[in-house]
Image (spheres, grey):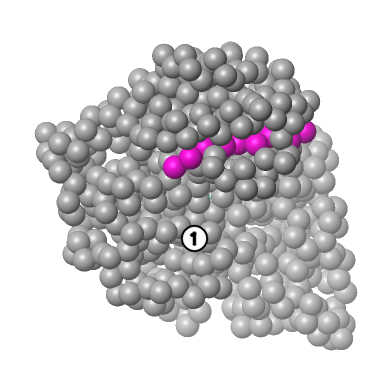
């Protein structure tokens, strides 16, 4: 979604703002803009398209100014045009502001402001706020912004400045993330910590309805009741290398190929083989609730939701725990039968997905224990949940989630052992899972050796317009994930099915032009899968199969085979998804698509 950067300090703000915008590119955007206070003038430029278009507009112009704001916009209200790009300003060009989120009552507010004489120059909901602040402004930007908030409905984060208040930047958030970076030379405020860490690793996450009033290196945080908030900075340990491609052509490939290490990072310090158990310090404070838990309800979106579906199979089979998964955007609108021993689990890479966060907040209102599996430390989901497990895999930059998915599966298997051992999982069973988890790094590296072969298969199939992805049991959600990956970055239509379900209707689609990718490892549903493959072959459909190393039977029936090492059935998804990630990647590359930033999508979906 949209990205925000603001700076007030001793340095020239232009380079800091542009660097921040470039680091936010991965989130997805369609236009960008900056506004800098340059002595008594405002320097403002906007461009449609990539940041380099904005840089071209700025050219070699020397811009002075230590205070500025910048934005990448992902269009919601109004098409991607320069007029609609942020920053927006009031009628007199004095109040400048960038915004993430949606102002739900903007039409009503706009009509009212127009009646009062305000002139608008964009179709955005954001501009309304610049005019509202203008209406309330009496020499104090923070107070005017605060008054405006009473009129606004929706989710937002804003950063604003006023031409007549020299080094002042004011920011506020509600339902959309905002982080402060405390550098030696000043304060940087951004929607995402990736825009900050080149300047500083000391950050403060703002809570909803907190206002930060920045003046160079000084800042104060207040709430809406004007109460002063003392907040401690935390240290972010992500490195700059983690934010760069390090020789890979795309972040997505870097992230796919980094999975032997990231899976190990998620396991580090957590396996206790001699006890057949795992250590999850983040759950200690809810040990009693987990002990008494009768059912677990997982909430997530997209790829993270598919991880939860795999988790259902793991937790039910090995932890004897009734589990269901709900798509974040549906959670609020259905009635669920919770009881006081239910626990809600939010799974989110970014920790900022609005649909997942809203579900967690809804559960908190009902006093249900919430826990999170989150990658971004101190993100909104992490802060909203009572306890949790971090993925510890560094930033995921490509819009298509890959390393976060395998880490979510690993983390769910850790949770399975943890909860299973509290219930009736035996020591040998716990130990078996732990020992298999220890071997994942090596096995993932083996799967990655198939990359050239998979690139070759992509070359053969890249012109095909439709694909079916099939799997059963643990690999059914992987079929869904494989289809999502292909759609998302190569724009090829794909559908995921439970292997046994296709004959109930969708088999009608299959002919020689409609290939299937079948997940058929040697597991408890292997024979059944073989039967489904035969049904597809009998209708002339081509089949690409993912099966277990050494298997000859599958190779004898299908058109292409990719092998993965043998592991425990519950862990096969961690290996079987990787060929699907590589397949989607190579299809997109051959088709010349923007792999890391697919059209219409954003990395972190911070609106409902
Ligand atoms: O940050 P989150 O894990 O909460 O994101 C959830 C989904 O938006 C995300 O997984 C999305 O489906 C990916 N782009 C898929 O690759």
Q: Is residue 458 above or below residue 404?
A: above
Quadrant in the picture for residue 336:
bottom left
Quadrant in the picture for residue 580:
top right
Q: x, y percentage for residue 531?
A: 53, 32
In the image, is 107 to the left or to the right of 456?
A: right
Residue placed most toward the observer, 304 or 428: 428
Q: Which residues are magenta?
A: 465-473
> From this viewpoint, is residue 315 visible?
yes
Q: Is residue 228 above or below residue 417?
A: below
Mark 1, other Cα within 10 Å: few <14 / some 14–19 / many ≥20: some
Q: x, y percentage for residue 470?
A: 57, 37
The mark tally for this picture is: 1
User: Dot 1: what SS?
Assistant: strand
Residue name at image x 64 percent, y 26 percent: 537
> From this viewpoint, is residue 247 visible?
no
Q: Which residue is mark 1?
A: 326
The verdict on label 1 being within 8 Å of ligand 1 is no
Q: Quadrant of the C terminus?
A: bottom right
Residue name at image x 62 percent, y 62 percent: 607
Q: x, y percentage for residue 112?
A: 81, 85
**Magenta run includes residue 546:** no
Q: Is residue 120 above or below residue 506?
A: below
Residue placed most toward the observer, 605 or 461: 461
Residue name at image x 67 percent, y 40 percent: 507
Q: x, y percentage for residue 57?
A: 83, 40
Residue name at image x 73 percent, y 67 percent: 126
Q: Main secondary structure of the magenta part?
A: strand
**Magenta run includes residue 466:** yes
């Amino acid at each position: 979604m949209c990205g925000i950067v603001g700076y007030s300090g001793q340095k020239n703000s232009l380079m800091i703002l542009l660097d921040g915008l470039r680091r936010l590119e991965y989130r997805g955007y369609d236009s960008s803009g900056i506004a800098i206070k340059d002595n008594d003038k405002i320097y403002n430029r906007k461009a449609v398209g990539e940041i380099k278009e904005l840089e071209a507009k700025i050219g070699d112009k020397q811009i002075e100014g230590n205070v500025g704001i910048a934005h990448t916009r992902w269009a919601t209200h109004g098409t991607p045009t320069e007029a609609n790009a942020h920053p927006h300003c009031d009628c007199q060009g004095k109040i400048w502001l960038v915004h993430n989120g949606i102002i739900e009552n903007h039409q009503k507010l706009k009509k009212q402001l127009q009646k009062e004489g305000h002139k608008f120059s964009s179709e955005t909901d954001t501009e309304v706020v610049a005019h509202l602040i203008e209406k309330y402004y009496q020499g104090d930007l923070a107070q005017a912004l605060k008054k405006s908030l009473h009129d606004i409905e929706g989710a937002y984060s804003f950063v604003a400045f006023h031409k007549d208040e020299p080094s002042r930047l004011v920011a506020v958030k509600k339902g959309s993330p905002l982080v402060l970076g405390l550098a030696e030379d000043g304060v940087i405020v951004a929607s995402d910590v990736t825009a900050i860490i080149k300047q500083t690793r000391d950050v403060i996450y703002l809570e909803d309805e907190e206002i930060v009033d920045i003046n160079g290196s000084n800042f104060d945080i207040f709430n809406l009741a004007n109460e002063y908030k003392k907040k401690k900075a935390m240290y972010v340990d992500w490195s700059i290398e983690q934010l760069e491609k390090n020789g890979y052509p795309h972040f997505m490939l870097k992230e796919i190929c980094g999975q032997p290490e990231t899976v190990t990072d998620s396991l580090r310090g957590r396996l206790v083989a001699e006890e057949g158990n795992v250590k999850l310090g983040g759950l200690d404070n809810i040990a009693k609730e987990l002990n008494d838990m009768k059912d677990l309800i997982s909430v997530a979106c997209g790829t993270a939701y598919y991880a939860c579906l795999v988790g259902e199979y793991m937790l039910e089979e090995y932890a004897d725990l009734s589990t269901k998964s709900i798509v974040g955007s549906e959670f609020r609108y259905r009635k669920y039968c919770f009881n006081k021993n239910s626990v809600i689990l939010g799974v989110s890479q970014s920790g900022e997905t609005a649909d997942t966060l809203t579900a967690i907040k809804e559960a908190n209102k009902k006093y249900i224990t919430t826990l999170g599996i989150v990658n971004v430390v101190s993100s909104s989901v992490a802060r909203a949940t009572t306890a949790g497990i971090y993925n510890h895999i560094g930033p995921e930059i490509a819009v298509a989630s890959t390393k976060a998915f395998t880490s979510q599966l690993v983390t769910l298997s850790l949770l399975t052992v943890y909860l299973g051992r509290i219930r009736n999982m035996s020591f040998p069973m716990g130990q078996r899972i732990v020992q298999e988890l220890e071997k994942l790094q090596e096995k993932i590296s083996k799967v990655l050796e198939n990359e050239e072969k998979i690139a070759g298969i992509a070359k053969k199939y890249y012109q095909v317009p439709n694909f079916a992805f099939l799997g059963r049991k643990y690999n059914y959600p992987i079929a869904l994930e494989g289809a999502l990956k292909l759609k998302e970055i190569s724009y090829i239509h794909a559908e995921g099915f439970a292997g046994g379900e296709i004959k109930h209707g969708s088999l009608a689609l299959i002919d020689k032009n409609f290939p299937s990718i079948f997940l058929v490892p040697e597991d408890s549903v292997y024979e059944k899968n073989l039967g489904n493959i035969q049904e597809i072959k009998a209708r002339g459909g081509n089949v690409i199969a993912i099966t277990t190393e050494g298997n000859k039977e599958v190779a004898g029936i299908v058109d292409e085979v990719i092998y993965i090492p043998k592991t425990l059935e519950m862990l096969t998804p961690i290996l079987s998804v990787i060929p699907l990630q590589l397949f989607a990647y190579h299809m997109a590359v051959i088709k010349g698509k923007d792999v890391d930033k697919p059209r219409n999508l954003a990395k972190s979906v911070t609106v409902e």
